[in-house]
Image (cartoon, coloured by chain):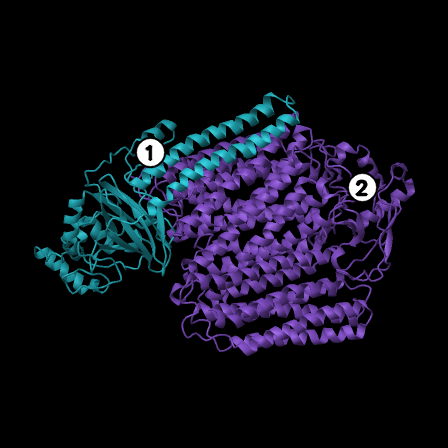
Amino acid sequence: MNVMMRDRNDIRRSCFSRVPALTLLSLLVLAGCGREQSALNVAGRDAAAISLLFWVMLVGAVLLWLMVNGAFLYVSRFAPGRFDERHGRRLLIGGGIVLPTVVLTALLVWGLSLLPDSRTPGDGLVVRVTGEQWWWRVEYWPEGATEPVVSANEIRLPVGERTEFRLLADKVIHSFWIPALGGKMDMFPGRETTFTLLPDKPGTYRGQCAEFCGASHAWMAFVAVAMEPEEFDAWLQAQAEDAAPPADDAARRGQAVFRDEGCGACHTVRGTDAVGQVGPDLTHIGSRLSLGAGRARVTLDDLATWVAHTDALKPEVRMPSYDLGEDELRDLAHYLKGLR
Amino acid sequence: MKTPPSGIPKPEGTYPPTEAMLAEPVPEDLAKAQTARLRKAWAAPPGWRYPSAVNNTEVGKWYCMTALSFMLMAGVMALIMRLQLAVPENDLVSADRFNQLFTMHGSAMMFLFAVPLFEAISILLLPGMLGARDMPFPRLSAYGYWSFLIGGIFVIGSTFFDAAPRAGWFMYPPLATEDEGPGSDIWLLGLSFIEIASIAAAVELIVGALKCRPPGMRVNIMPLYAWYVMVVGGMILFAFPPLIAGDFLFELERSFDWPFFDPTRGGDPMLWQHLFWIFGHPEVYIIFLPSIAIAAMVIPTVARRPIFGYSWIVLSAVGTGFLSFGLWVHHMFTTGLPSISLGFFSAASEAVVIPTGIQIFAFLATLMAGRVKMTLPMLWISGALAIFTMGGLTGVMLALAPFDFQVHDTYFIVAHLHYTLFGGMVFPVIAGVYYFFPFIQKKLLSERLGKWAFWLIFSGFNLTFLPMHLTGLWGMPRRVYTYPTDLGWDGLNMISTIGAFIIAAGFAIFVWDLIRPKGHQPQIPRNPWDAGTLEWTHDVPEETWGVRSIPHVTTRYPLWDQPQMQARMDAGRYYLPDAEEGKRETLVTSVIDAEPIQVQRVTGPTWITHLAALFTGGAFIFPTFHLYPPAIVSGALAICCIIWWLWTSTARPPEADSKDVGLGLRLPTYAAGPSSVGWWAMWITMLGDATAFSSVVFGFFFYWTASPDFPPDGAAHAAAGWVGLAAVAFALNWMMTVGARQLNRAGSVGAARLCLVLAPATAALGAASLIVSVWGLAPESHVYPAILWALTVWIAAHTGAGVIMQLYCLAGSLFGKMTPRYDADIWNVSLFWHFVTISALVTCAVMGLAPEAL
């Protein structure tokens, strides 16, 4: 099962193979791929500044490395005893003190000047994200809102605006990170942390928890979508709606399974009697781009597999695996897929 | 200290020795008899009693081999992880197993390999470099070694029972505090046990470098290695205690539900992060500096000239040590701290480049001015430089907070830290193994195998870790047991896995070279590299005495600059050429100028250290399974063993006050107070103890400043009256203890004994009052009562130890071990109480004044 969504017509090209890439050449080929979770595949202002900083530091580091190791090779191999104490002192003071002082001062001035960016206030939209084991509880608070639009495991942002994130955690520490847009920020139980991100390229990206948070840390991801502002507003409005009623018989049977199995004890489907707060809100699960916090796709097959084998897909997850008949599973998946 | 030494004679006779005295030959018969006596006194026990040896050369060897074994085990864990990560969505190991593996890999490499190996190598080499016969407290080294072995097997062994810690080597709460099963307790208690052994070794190494140098070796001419030992020992002393304090709070939370790190009851997980990284960052330099020290010994030999910029290097080492304590927040850049903190710690983290750079450039300058012979050790040093500079340069990148925001907790960090640790530790240590192997066996390791091992490890290392920089930049977080395909990580991970097995092949060759039988290889002469420092005078493995006689040293490279030294040492021309009483002895010299001041009797083979280590281990290991009664029994037995060991072998009144040490010099055989090694050891230990106590107090003020509800409204406070009584009692106890010391020295033995009866009573009263003052508070309810209880427990435990010490002195006075003349014990005990009294009074002030101030 795949995290990323095969049915999406994004920039991803299938240039991967399971054959191990052994040569530098194939490395370079790999480097040509679009990557949703790369800090170098820049789609936000903060990520762009950091990326530029990195490339400049990389060039500097390579030069300095060549200098030091070249000097070492030269004095130890090719020029034994050609120098005296006077040269030694010059080398010590020049290389050990003057050079690093100059380079580091310049670097600090530049690097630290980037600090305020991610701390600048947002342009209005506030997104509250709570890290749970191992999924994301998401609330959108547009400017002036009195109650949030609740979602889960997916972050959508308007392009060209700074969105403020207010981060919390349920039980253990997590870290919120969308590499394509900018740096990460840890999420603590009992203490709110905040930062802002400014996407400037529409697209679909991937975020992942970066702080080790237990057994399924590896499977705590999400899809981040940067959208044009008007598109975003429309989407948010749709998200605020209650769930769509089941459209056909299969969906109605699926809803019955959902009710009979007690899914509503943990999950909310707004507009129904499912109001559980333990697990992710499922009101619009059918329209999301991933299932199980970036673990699978929202397809009928994946939905059925997830419900039947949660622990196999996500070790130690709190949601139990449900031993349902094939028909029940299919109906349930159909119902969920219809919650668009 | 104004008190004059009580009738113990001062050193008398000629010092320094004249050339004429040194030129005079030693009569052959006398030399022969001396040799026989020395050999007998210093022989390691044969046959099945061999493990009871305490000679630094034996203990050092075991220590090194044990640390190396733990490293290999942790390396195998890394290989399993690399196999799991070779392909996406792999199911070779489960998530839980993987989490145990990476937790144990990091913990074992840090606590069971890197730090102990430094201590092991130093125990092995330092006395040799200083021309001393042994470490000042051989039994303490042995006790530390056996504790390390027991604790290490316990901790790493948990992996085989699927019960290993699994919350990461940094053990962040609440994940680690909430974790079910014994894993976290094994980490906390098992490693605390080892940390205490590490501190013991650090104390001994510092005292060794300060007090056991040969006559004439002033601090400014001692081998650079000894300087690094002092710096690193000092760092261990200040870095480990915050972690031990953190472990103490952590284990109280795990065992008794005192909510230090639980945010729902006023606790704060950030306190652990601070305490952990105040330890964790200096730890990096604790690992790195000793390896620089090895390079500082190898490079002058290879360059065939003295090290360039000796004082620059010493100052830089000290500077690195200092700065390393101001960097810890760079491990916490993404925790949402204010920008001003980020800026400060970014700058501090960059600043440490400068002293590090100076050390490297001083080596470069030495090579530049010398005539380099490319030997196998030098090949490994070159590899170290290539790898370390790269790790250093990525470190410069990471120190900039904004860049760290991106790559923090990704594979970029995994690459960075392995570059610094392989370049800054593994390669220099292997260089050291090739360089110092003839010091142990008078054989060389194979040139051919050495080159194979080098190129395999070097290329395998870069194949594994160079791509990881990119893996991290492409977004792969650390500590994930698997990953989805399609994110571009598949190929990079496969390359890293292949590289890891190439490293493993290199290590297999290295280890084989190390342990293969070398019986057929001819012995090489002493000092095969023609080095300039004293360790190469050792005649191993034939003679276990270290040096035949302890030389008078006046230069940095005595074997180069004092050409007759080796011959004269071997002839027994210098100090302590004999062991008339059949006892093990070494010289104690003054701290700065290394003037001889005392003959120190050092302890010989014993089993008591094994028993003491075993029972100490029990006291730490039983509580991991919540078996408290056996733990208490075990702890009590450990204390009994230690008392017996101290009583029978330390600070015993000698048969004569002074003795002839050769070259017309008579030295006292007993010392008390500041001129004795024991007093220095106590001082240094208590500095560490005070640091740990300060860390707990720091916790109190951290809660106060970081959380608005500390203490919560209407919280009950410690009962002020009882706190006041405790303060008075502790002050009285201190006066009695110091009074006992003064009265005893003045000859009023009866009055001193009375003081030693009253002092424990007042100390007990103090601890009891403190306990009564917090008795009504419920430590599970909120962090405020919990931290007051923690302070109380800390002081009560120290009071317990202090009372035992006072009674030990009383017994010593009653049974003739402690007299007005021989009073080292009471000096050390009153020093202990100086520190504990301050801790107790600070505790009383915090507890008594908190209700007023907060």
Query: Dot 2: what SS?
Result: loop
Report how far apart the C-alphas of labels 1 and 2 lie in the structure: 67 Å
The amino acid type found where label 1 is placed reads Val
The amino acid type found where label 2 is placed reads His
Q: How crowded is the residue under tag 2: few (<14 C-alpha within 10 Å), some, or many (20+)?
A: many
Q: Is residue B142 visible?
A: yes
Q: How crowded is the residue under tag 1: few (<14 C-alpha within 10 Å), some, or many (20+)?
A: few
Chain B rendering hue: purple
Q: Give whichever of B439, A168 is nearer the camera.
A: A168
The chain to which mark 1 is attached is A
- Which residue, as the protein is rendered here, is positioned at the far front? B853
Q: Position of residue A299 (x, y in %)?
A: 19, 48
Q: Give whichever of A301, B203 is nearer the camera.
A: B203
Marks 1, 2: nearer the viewer:
2
Q: Which mark is residue B552?
A: 2
Q: Which mark is residue B382?
A: none
Q: Position of residue B742 (x, y in %)?
A: 77, 68
Q: Are marks 1 and 2 in contact (CB under 8 Å)?
A: no
Chain A rendering hue: cyan
Q: Is residue B634 visible?
A: no
Indicate whether B528 appears above or below B585: above
